[in-house]
Image (cartoon, rainbow, N blue to C red):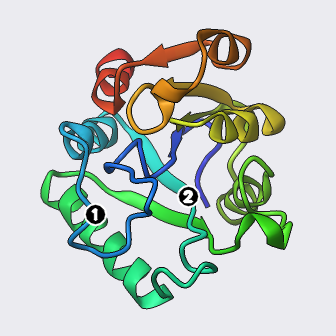
Amino acid sequence: MLENQQKIIILDRDGVINEDSDDYIRSPKEWQPIPGSIEAIAKLCRSSYKVFVFTNQSGIARGYFDLQTLEQMHHKMTTLVEKAGGKIEKIYFCPHSPADNCNCRKPKTGMLEQLQQENGIDLQKTIVVGDSIKDIDAAIRVGATPFMVMTGKGHRFSQNEIDQRAPKVFKDLAEIAKYLC
């Protein structure tokens, strides 16, 4: 278990770490990191942050890709991070569609609660980074500090929507790493 005094940052995947697509990221080949994101994760790790990922992956429920393909995408991501000198502690994902009404799909908090239980983390002492209001709302619901990036879907939201939820808004994950480290 992790100690509560450790620095924890929880990242959304699509639009924060890798390029996003309205047609879904369906293969390891399509999974492409946002410039600077892999190095940002490594920088956070060098500054004693423990990095976790939480991500909605309804492409599984929709039949766009299977669990094995998702695992291959995650292997690509973690390998790139490790080569840069960082580490992703664990990846949490929701494979359900919005119609499934599960507890793990953001903006619901099931993934964050599972992360908390499995790792002994005080979510009120964590930072959650997202590019979507769903990510930010999940963070707020568990008392985490939400950071929003303008990569991915971040640019689609009105300034009013963002201002009401996210106390800190950044250009990208690299800017967050620079701010925190």
The image quarter in which residue 124 lies: top right
Circle 2 SS class: strand
Earlier sequence position, callout 2 versus callout 1: 1
Horizontal relation, residue 53 to residue 86: left or right: right
Q: Position of residue 139 (x, y in %)?
A: 71, 37
Q: Which residue is mark 2?
A: 55
Residue 36, quarter of the rendered image = top left
The residue drawn where x is 63% and y is 17% is 162
Q: Amino acid at mark 1?
A: Trp
Indicate whether 120 appears above or below 100.
above
Q: Pointers 2 and 1 in contact (CB under 8 A)?
A: no
Mark 1 secondary-structure assignment:
loop
Q: Amino acid at mark 2?
A: Thr
Where 45 sits versus 155, above or below?
Answer: below
Q: Which mark is residue 91?
A: none
Position of 74 compared to 134: left or right? left
**Residue 65, percent across and down?**
45, 83
Question: Is residue 129 shown left or right of residue 73?
Answer: right
Residue at left 84%, top 63%?
A: 103
How crowded is the residue under tag 1: few (<14 C-alpha within 10 Å), some, or many (20+)?
many
Residue at horizontal 14 percent and vertical 51 percent from the top:
84
Q: Is residue 5 above or below residue 22?
A: above
The residue carrying mark 1 is 31
Vertically, is 171 above or below 118? above
